[in-house]
């Protein structure tokens, strides 16, 4: 089983970006936890981060035939990107939407996700642990379906 972890804009700033909201862990910490979790479950995981919407769309589009599922933290694109939504729907791979913070406890514009309706699940508010939980959930989903 092969998984793809995608991280959207500004997540490369984890560790220094608004630590009161996002914590002190880095993107490398999150990727390492996701990879370790996948390996413990008998899966492999590749990771990619971009601040550029089109690069994320391309990564999703190229995933079919290579990956069994996707975990994506679309970050701010969650609330704006029809292109990411359409890519997830179009590629047809089970996808879990992940957020470090609970977006419903934040500004009203963060309460709407364009991508969640085309994902098999949405996970938010668990900080760094969310990366492990999202991988565990996706692997369980893939084993059941």
Image: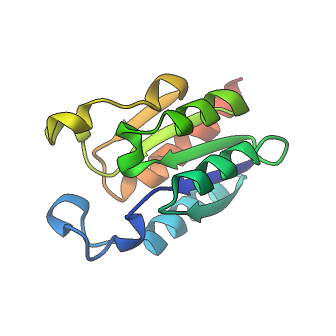
Q: Is residue 126 left or right of residue 97?
A: left
**What residue is shown at x 72% (from left), y 52% (from top)?**
42
Number of marks in the image? 0
Q: Is residue 135 left or right of residue 111?
A: right
Most extreme residue toward the right is 65
- The image quarter containing residue 19 is bottom left
Of the 4 image quadrants, the one containing the C terminus is top right
Between residue 25 and residue 72, name the one nearer to us: 72
**What residue is shown at x 76% (from left), y 48% (from top)?**
62
**What residue is shown at x 67% (from left), y 58% (from top)?**
45
Q: Is residue 94 left or right of residue 112?
A: right
Residue 27 vertical placement versus 93 (above, below): below
- The image quarter containing residue 114 is top left
Tell me, yes or no, if residue 98 can be seen here.
Answer: yes
Residue 61 image position (x, y, % from top left): 72, 43
Which color scheme did the rendering employ for the protein?
rainbow
Between residue 103 and residue 89, name the one nearer to us: 89
Residue 128 vertical placement versus 19 (above, below): above
Q: Is residue 55 left or right of residue 24?
A: right
Residue 130 vertical placement versus 87 (above, below): below
Residue 129 image position (x, y, % from top left): 38, 55
């Amino acid at each position: 089983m092969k998984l793809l972890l995608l991280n959207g804009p500004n997540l490369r700033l984890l560790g220094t970006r608004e630590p009161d909201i996002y914590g002190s862990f880095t993107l490398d910490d999150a990727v390492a936890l996701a990879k370790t979790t996948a390996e413990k479950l008998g899966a492999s995981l590749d990771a990619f981060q971009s601040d550029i919407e089109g690069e994320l769309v391309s990564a999703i589009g190229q995933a079919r035939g290579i990956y069994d599922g996707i975990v994506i933290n679309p970050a701010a694109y969650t609330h704006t990107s029809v292109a990411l939504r359409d890519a997830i729907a179009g590629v047809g791979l089970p996808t879990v939407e992940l957020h470090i913070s609970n977006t419903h406890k934040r500004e009203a514009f963060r309460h709407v996700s364009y991508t969640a309706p085309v994902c098999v699940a949405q996970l938010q508010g668990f900080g760094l642990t969310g990366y492990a939980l999202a991988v565990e959930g996706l692997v369980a989903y893939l084993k059941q379906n």
